[in-house]
Amino acid sequence: MGQRSRSDGAATNNDSLLGRAVRLIPLSVDHAEALFPSASDPEVWRWMPRPRPGSLIETREMISQMLADRTRRCFAVQRLTDETVIGSTSLYELDLAEGHAEIGATWFDRVCWGGPYNAESKFLLLAHAFGDLGLARIALRTDNLNVRSQQAMTRLGLVYEGTLRSHMVRQDGTRRDSLYYSVLVEEWPSVRDKLVTRVAAKAGV
């Protein structure tokens, strides 16, 4: 599952990552119109630490800020069956010298929840990180109240590392604890197999 859209295998910001259900394509401000309906959905945005955009202009500004961060590699998620952009995901705090990054800023249209799209997006990002970029460690963090996310990461075999207490302010003004999970390159084969199984099950393969 998954291959690069380029034949030379080089890892650049212009690469897209191809799976069976989705293609991750480099995010651009041009994707704002497609992403605004999901980004402005309060339920989709419930656990996001970034303020929810209330207009197309704010969505463009948010994407511009994300793209200006040189430690990010941001992608739009394109459904292969109709080439519709259904969400976004990113590698951030990317440090090639130290060999680590985090996965986050991930959201999908609500109608796509429960499908193979999120799981395959994680698979493609992790394969890119460990294979193309040669990273040693990938981390993911989640709100302490987001039990569903915590359970999903545990099922995939990610290791819970600890909690940063009172780590950031939620959109409602309350303070959030952030739970950190990670996968190391030597653990990737096991996590990869679980992701492949999960994607196949959700896709009905």
Image (cartoon, rainbow, N blue to C red):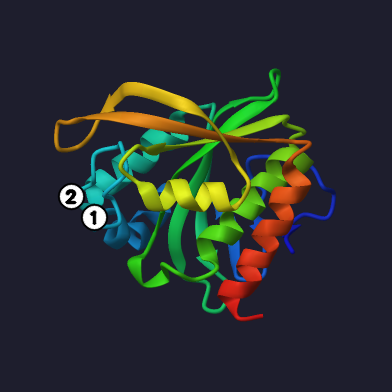
Displayed quadrant of residue 86: bottom left
Residue at the image point whose x is 33% and y is 29% from the top: 177
Where does the image place residue 11, in percent across and percent down from the top left?
A: 74, 40
**Does the CB distance between marks 2 and 1 fall below 8 Å?**
yes
Residue drawn at 29 percent across, 47 percent down: 59
Q: Residue at left 65%, top 72%?
A: 200
**Circle 2 residue:** 54
Q: Is residue 15 left or right of residue 78?
A: right
Q: Secondary structure at mark 2?
A: loop
Residue 67 in sight: yes
Toward the top, the furthest residue is 97
Q: Quadrant of residue 161?
A: top right
| Rendering coords of residue 42 (x, y %) | 21, 55
For label 1, the residue is 40
Q: Is residue 63 above or below residue 43?
A: above
Q: Earlier in the sequence, mark 2 or mark 1?
A: 1
Residue 73 or 104: which is nearer the viewer?
Answer: 104
Residue 18 visible in this rendered orientation of the protein = no
Where is 101 relative to 44, above or below? above
Indicate the amino acid at tag 1.
Ser
CA–CA distance in space, label 2 to label 1: 6 Å
Q: Nearer the viewer, residue 191 or 61?
A: 191
Local secondary structure at mark 1: loop
Badge 1: residue crowd in 10 Å (few <14, some 14–19, many ≥20): some
